[in-house]
Image: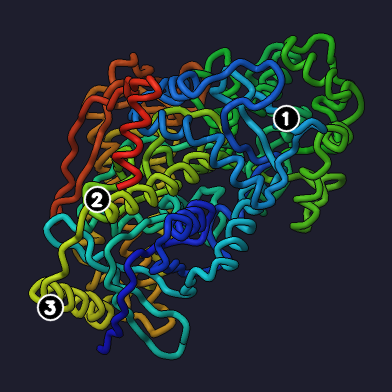
Amino acid sequence: MEIKELTIENIVVGTGAAGFQAALRLHQNGDRDVAILTERMNGGTSRNTGSDKQTYYKLSLASGDMDSVRTMAEDLFAGQCVDGDQALCEAALSARCFFALTELGVPFPCTEYGEYMGYKTDHDRGRRATSAGPYTSKLMTECLERSVREKGVRIMDRMQVIRLLVRDGRIYGVLCLDNRERDREGYVLVWCRNVILATGGPAGMYHDSVYPVSQLGSSGMAFEAGAAGKNLTEWQFGLASLNPRWNVSGTYMQVLPRFVSTDQEGGDEREFLMEYFEREEDMLSMVFLKGYQWPFDVNKIFGGSSVIDLLIYQETILRGRKVYLDFTRNPGDGAVPFEKLAPEAYDYLKQAGALFGTPIERLKQMNEPAIFFYQDHKVDLYHEKLEVAVCAQHNNGGIATDGYWETKIRGLFAAGEACGSHGVTRPGGTALNAGQAGALRAAQKIRLRKLHGRERAVSDHIRQALREEAKEFVNLPMQARGTMALGELWQKAAVRMSACGGMIRERGRLERALREIEGELEGYLGLVKTPSTNQLSLFYRLRDMLISQKVYLSAMVDYIKSGAGSRGSALYMDENGRLPEGNLPELYRCRLDNGAHGGIVQEVTLWGRECRAQWRPVRPIPQVDYFFENQWRTYREREMV
């Protein structure tokens, strides 16, 4: 098999907001030998996802709102299992990255005097959140892409990176499947010095997912190359529509829609939430709070809005029914008792001028673009119900990196959701900020390394060894001799992951799933059919997904064995616990994490066929000497050699 070879000093993998920002920062730093590799130019989460008003989290920049970099860093750090240096970077760079986006044309709203006002989001004690509407990340991606193209940065579309070529803890190149011609197979080996992975989270692992179908992730190849996984147990699960896939957070909940369930054929309709709540106003207040307490949170189950998620889980998973949001009628078919709602809900709706009408009328008043989104996807909320479920939405964990977003492999960086810079909980919208800050930091490290030292050339011996490794890898498809279709195995693996590694987890089920995945990986070539040329992409993608599942499930099993309890979006059943039908307090038997694990980070590394987990203390928020002359001298030494 012929493998073409190229040499490009800096490679960015991915064309989302983080990937384009990384390429743009490299170019701004004077690096012209840069290329972006992407499997699908218009794919990925940044370009294809959002919510009622997709949030970008940043430092407060309006009116009398009191804020500081340190305060924001402390709030990020308080999410548990967050490294302080990364929290400080994300806080310190938030305003710089935000204003860079506004200058590129992202239409974040401001007052007539230029103040960028904000609102409160989940896990936020201030008003740092802002939004450019349902398509915030799409707008970011488009503006960043336009700037990258204007600067002439090379973009190589339909190039699927399938293997990272690493020796002695250093990246030397990437192996790509060239999908530009579907009728013949082709491979390209790109020799490089630096790689920034901006491939998003491993969304393809889950069947019940709000990620766009074009978002699959590529974390498996990073684990296989020796990068560590960090906080892999920590996901966000939340309420989402199934067709189209979209978060029904924020205003979708705050307008108080009707929740109904039906049997699989659409009959036996009933409003099921009132089976748990004694008073209608309590139920409505919790639905309202679900808007900005959107992710499922075990600390908000009893007496909190996450009870809504569990009631939906009970209805869909345990009872086998379908759940819908109905915006055409008020809950109970009567008038909403606005005056009896919790003060937080009543005051918000009053200030929004929405103490009237039906949910769809209130949604039009408060956020009409949220209606337009579904109209664009052939769903008329004025007349149709919207099927929903609790879905995987975001991975707070990911690939472990340092304060410059570099993995333990020299020259390999991870930015955006691929990087595990978040902890157990995080304020809504921090992901977009973290992707921009991480991309900037990675580009900065590449510049500093080039400024301060000379990288040794790749020896002929290493090049030849990596060529042989690449040849062996591209020969794998020809060795497949099984009978199972690739899509069939993918469906089986994804359904299994949602069943055991979703928001409700039990040790026995996790261990059984892990054994099954290990068997599938071990016997992969004897299990799947020989792929045709146009199936090669799926062949490598499925293998990558199974590796990711193995590492993630290993992390979850190790977490349970450590004695830690339920936290974040994961409810861990007590040993021998099961899910019988019944009243909610009896249904979900678990114990909450006591906080003892909040100051330590779990990291998992794949060594051959074995996953090894270790726990370490979080890196604290750095204590910085802010005396100007000292920092000015340090800055000159660091940046102006």
Task: Judge the density around disc 3: few (<14), some (14-19), many (≥20) Cα neighbours within 10 Å.
Answer: few
Quadrant of res 322: top right
Image point 42% across, 67% down: which residue? 32
Q: Secondary structure at mark 1?
A: loop
Q: Is residue 41 visible?
A: yes
**Mark earlier in primary sequence (3, 1):** 1
The secondary structure type at the circle numbered 2 is: helix
Picture residue at 22% right of the left edge, 74% below the top: 473
Disc nearer the start of the sequence (3/2): 2
Which residue is under mark 3?
A: 464
Is 207 placed above or below 510 here? below
Which disc, if any, is residue 452? 2
Three-letter amino acid code at the position of disc 1: Glu
Residue that mark 1 sits on: 115
Residue drawn at (63%, 37%) of the image: 55
In the image, taking residue 433 as reference, residue 496 lies left or right, namely left
Mark 1 Cα within 10 Å, few/some/many (few <14, many 20+)? Answer: few
Q: Position of residue 63 (x, y in %)?
A: 71, 20
In the rendered structure, find residue 417 and report the number of the disc placed on it. Answer: none
